[in-house]
Each structure stands twice: as C-alpha cells, then as structure tokens.
Image: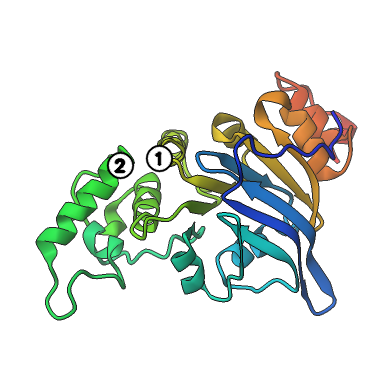
Amino acid sequence: MSSHTTMAPTKEAILSLTGISKSFGAVAALKDIDLEVAPGEVVAVVGDNGAGKSTLVKVLSGVHSPDAGSITFESRPETIPTPMAALNLGIATVFQDLALCDNLNVINNLFLGRELSRYRLNEVEMETRSWELLKQLSAKIPSLHTPIASLSGGQRQTVAIARSLLGNPKVIILDEPTAALGVAQTAEVLNLVERLRERGLGVIMISHNMADVQAVADRVAVLRLGKNNGTFRVADVTTEEVIAAITGASDNVVSRRSASRLPAPPTQESAS
C-alpha cells in the first residue's frame, strides 16, 4: 500500500482542516495539513518527534493560530483564535499533562473554573453531575472525594476526560492519553476512547503507541516533518506500513524489527 493513500471518513466530517500551515520564525512546523474527523470516529494522528503533532493540537485547541489554511466545523468555516473559542465551538482538548490539581478531590477538579452557582457552591448538584459524567464513561473511580494525588495514572486520565465532557463537546482531542501508563491502565483509557466513540463524538488521538492505534482507531493519519504522509483505514493497513510512512522508508531497521514476532539475536545493524 502506498504511504500517500488518503482515506476520507465514511460519514460527513464534523471537523475538517484544509491546507493548515504554521511556522515559528524560519521553522515550518506544519505545511499544508489536511485532516478530517467524523462523528463517532476515532482518528489517530501519529508521527515521530518533530512531526508537528503538538503544533497541530495547539492549532485545534486555539493556542496557536495557523498562518494559512481553513478550518470547517459542522460544515461552517470557523476560526479558533483562543482556547475559549475552541471550547465554545465544541472542541475539547485533554493535554498530556492533564492540568489536574493534586490537592483537590475528583469533584473539585471536574468543576475547576466552572463551579456551579456564583456565590455559594452547589456541592450536591456538582457531586450528582460528577457521577453522571463518570457513569457515561463507565469509569472506575472509588470515591469522588478522593484527592487526585492518590489516584492511578489511568484514573487521572479518566477524570481529565470526564472534565472535558462538561461543555458537551462534539470533538475531543486526546494528547498521548496512554503515555507512561501500565498495561491495565492503558486498557482502562482505551475503553474510555470507545465510550466517547459510542456517544457519537469525533475523537482525535495523538499517539506514539501503534498497539493503541490498532486497538481503537478507525483511521490513522501520519505526519512526517510537518506534512501529511498518508491517511489509512486501520482495518486495511499493517503496523509495518504505518511505521514506513512515519519514517519515510518502506524498509528500514524499525519496520523489520516490528515485523519480527520473536526476539532475534542482536546483529551489527540492530545494535548500531
């Protein structure tokens, strides 16, 4: 399969980027990027360090404005000048650092900056709404009054994703949601991604982990050196083909090593 095959979503896209470019001084971080996500679809965005994934997330979340290109949301041309504009539009982003306060409990983190009632906190309503949000995700959090500091990595990710649902977004961007998680916690987070898809949300998942991509994504978009280098339907592509698109080579040490099911004895080439 060619690494430049482009697969459009099967349904009409809710969010569509066309020709998005962004430079920082002489460095072109994104060059002519196209990306689409449909309701109830998970699109994984993969690429090496420096491929432009972080810049793309920041453009979508309103942190950076693109220098060129257009953004369409629900078939309307839109601009995303600020993070608040992204939220108001219906795009929520869960950044890799999660932005949770360790000393506060689950409820207070969920409603941080969006506390119900202006002068006196409506704690009962906030607790009820918290349970509803976590129930939508079939989440396993032992107590809403637990400080975030005592939760596992997977549970923290759960709280951050639940918080992103507060504004009833239509698209959620997950930036490396399983980074630094163990096997069980990763499975927990991938289940959450499935729940988001079932609720009809468009999900853009930035990931380094090809196993995670194969497990939950419908399509995978490859970025290489700030440019599109292929969009594939996950069911139709092998991990080796995606890695070849990421590295820009159809045959290299990485893809050969990935293709090998059993550990091979070290060779001079793989040791170098």
Q: Residues within 10 Å of mark 1 (few under 14, many from 20)?
A: some
The foreground one among 30 and 75 is 75
Label 1 SS: loop
Which sits earlier in the primary sequence, circle 1 or circle 2?
2
Q: Is residue 137 visible?
A: yes
Task: Point out residue 26 in the picture as x, y percentages from the top left corner.
Answer: 85, 77
Q: Are marks 1 and 2 in contact (CB under 8 Å)?
A: yes
Q: Which residue is denoted by mark 2 in the rendering?
A: 136
Q: In which quadrant will I find the N terminus? A: top right
Q: Residue 266 appears in which quarter of the rendering?
A: top right
Query: Is 143 above or below relative to 194?
Result: below
Colouring style? rainbow
Residue position for label 1 = 199
In the displayed structure, does residue 123 sit left or right of residue 15?
Answer: left
| Residue at the image point whose x is 39% and y is 45% from the top | 154
Place of residue 206 in the rendered image (x, y in percent of width and height, measured from the top left): 60, 49
Which residue occupies 47% across, 34% down? 183
The residue at the point 52 percent across, 52 percent down is 174
- Side (left or right) of 23 relative to 17: right
| Displayed quadrant of residue 140 | top left
Residue type marked 1: Arg
